[in-house]
Image (cartoon, rainbow, N blue to C red):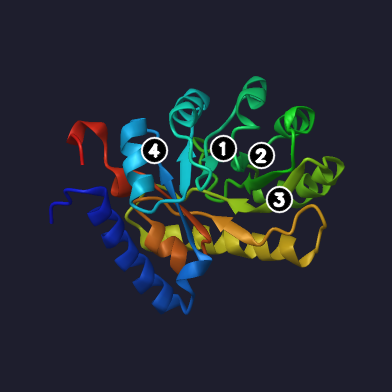
Amino acid sequence: MVLDTIQQRISLIEEHIHAACERAGRKREDLSIVAVTKQVSAKRTKEAINAGIKNVGENRPDGLLSKRSEIRDDNVKWHFIGNVQSRKVKDIINEIDVLHSLDRMSIAKEIQKRAEKIVQCFVQVNVSGEESKSGLHPDELLSFIEELSNYDKIRVIGLMTMAPFTKDEDLIRNVFRSLRKLRDEISSKQFGHAPCTQLSMGMSNDYVIAIEEGATHVRIGTALVGTESEGDV
């Protein structure tokens, strides 16, 4: 099946999402799609927005700032989903609505120093233990979140992780299930600064499994916006 337009891509993704929600006994409205636009232009990003996308994710400061300067739409929420260096926090923190990659106290300190308003954050956890992935070890999570109570510019809305890139669905499912359990543990503490009700997990290759395991935010890139090499869509 050749998908010629972003609208066709979104329609197919929506079919998969609705089916996954039905299997999991969930409501579609409890799930947000974050369109990951790091590999496409502002023009392609605008096409996704015009097709109904309300959440846009970038993983590099320059990519975020470039698109923000070209796209002025108050209905769009901007998500930063990549690792950010401490020295770059000042460049992006007041340009985004949600940060998906908080995993170091040095970042928290910069947010506290630079943010003009409370920043909604996902704390990133390296559930799979892969050396190539960033994030806290699960054993470090509770103490990290407890320490964040000292930073009133940060609100921990949930946890984020990335599963291994593999065809082993059981392994992927176990990673997502483990993050959900960690989320539930933190949420049960009823921290004022960390309600921790959300789960950012699932990408183009595994978002269906993530939804079945409780994701509230799925980060979909190529399956939704394609790549520039495919030409205009």
- Cα distance in 3D space between marks 1 and 4: 20 Å
N-terminal label among 2 and 3: 2
Find residue 156 and name its label.
3
Q: Secondary structure at mark 1?
A: loop
Callout 1 environment at 10 Å: few (<14), some (14 to 19), or many (20+)? many
Q: Secondary structure at mark 3?
A: strand
Circle 4 residue: 37
- Cα distance in 3D space between marks 2 and 4: 23 Å
Q: Is there CB contact under 8 Å for labels 2 and 1?
A: yes
**Which quarter shows the N terminus?**
bottom left
N-terminal label among 2 and 4: 4
Find residue 103 and name its label.
2
Question: Type of residue at label 1?
Answer: Ser
Question: Type of residue at label 4?
Answer: Thr
- Cα distance in 3D space between marks 2 and 1: 8 Å
* Front tag of 1 and 4: 4
Instruction: Give coordinates of residue 57: x percent, y percent.
Output: 47, 41
Q: Is residue 40 visible?
A: no
- Residue at 36% in and 39% down: 46
* Front tag of 2 and 3: 3
N-terminal label among 1 and 4: 4
Q: Is there CB contact under 8 Å for labels 2 and 4?
A: no
Circle 1 residue: 134
Viewer-nearest residue: 116 or 38: 116
